[in-house]
Image (cartoon, helix red, strand yellow):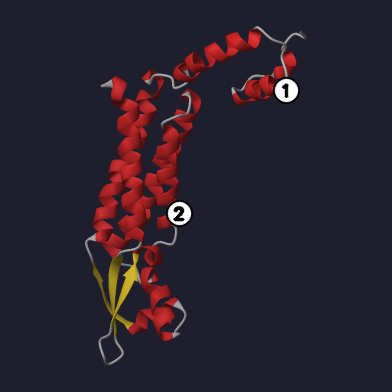
Amino acid sequence: MIRRARLLAVVVLVACGAVTVISSTQTWLLAVLDDGGAHALEVAGAAAIPVLAPLGLAVLALGGALSIVGRVLRYVFGALTVLIAVVLGWLTAQIVFAQPVGAVASTVTEATGITGEGAVADLVASIALTPWPAVTLVTTVVLLAAGAFTLATAHRWGGTGRRYRTEDAPRAAAAGSRPHDAIDSWDDLSRGEDPTTRPLD
């Protein structure tokens, strides 16, 4: 199980990030206006929660980076994942359980030109939920669990540098048979080594 812990964490983060980004483009709320025509405005997730898409992209990036980083950054990324999950969960829960007028205000203003939360509240007769806020809320719970799982198991994950060190061994041996030149110095920098500490040939 521990051997697959990194893979599991990465897959869950990428999946949660993808669902969050997709959710931001879907209709979350239907705002029915009290304008005599009972017009219903579709409110996308990105309009209800402006940070939804950026945070979803951040989770995708964290998932991808988590597959290659070392031990210290695993803990940093795990903590960031937990923080993002808490923020998204809090914002999404408000919409799921309260349907605040503020979540539809920007869409109503764009459609009618009416500004101000009080004026918008007077114009909105009702707000209905689609399934997407609930889907996103469940996703944040899974994301929170993935972040906690990362923090709990990161110290047992295998390293990622062994393969690269093995591949670099023949080149290092070959380099040792000739004078150290600028290309070798560049390779040292790429591997995170300081070429200035190498003894002069």
Image coordinates of residue 8 in percent, x first then y, are 30, 32
Is residue 144 at all visible to an observer of this figure? no
Image coordinates of residue 151 in percent, x first then y, are 39, 29
Q: Is residue 187 above or below residue 53?
A: above
Q: Secondary structure at mark 2?
A: helix
Residue at the location (28% across, 52% down)? Answer: 137
User: In this view, which residue lies farthest toward the right?
Assistant: 200
Q: Is residue 62 above or below residue 19?
A: above
Mark 1: amino acid:
Ala
Identify the residue under disc 1.
Answer: 182
Q: Are marks 1 and 2 in contact (CB under 8 Å)?
A: no
Distance from disc 1 to disc 2, alpha carbons, whole Å, reads 41 Å
Task: Specify the label residue 54 is tagged with.
Answer: 2
Q: Secondary structure at mark 1?
A: helix
Quarter of the image with the C terminus in it: top right
User: In this view, which residue lies farthest toward the bottom?
Assistant: 36
Category of crowding for the residue at label 1, using alpha-carbon neighbours closer than 10 angstroms: few (below 14), some (14–19), many (at least 20): few
Image coordinates of residue 68 in percent, x first then y, are 45, 29
**Which of the marked residues, 1 or 2, is nearer the chain's N terminus?**
2
Q: Is residue 39 above or below residue 137?
A: below
Left or right: where does residue 150 sit relative to residue 162?
A: left
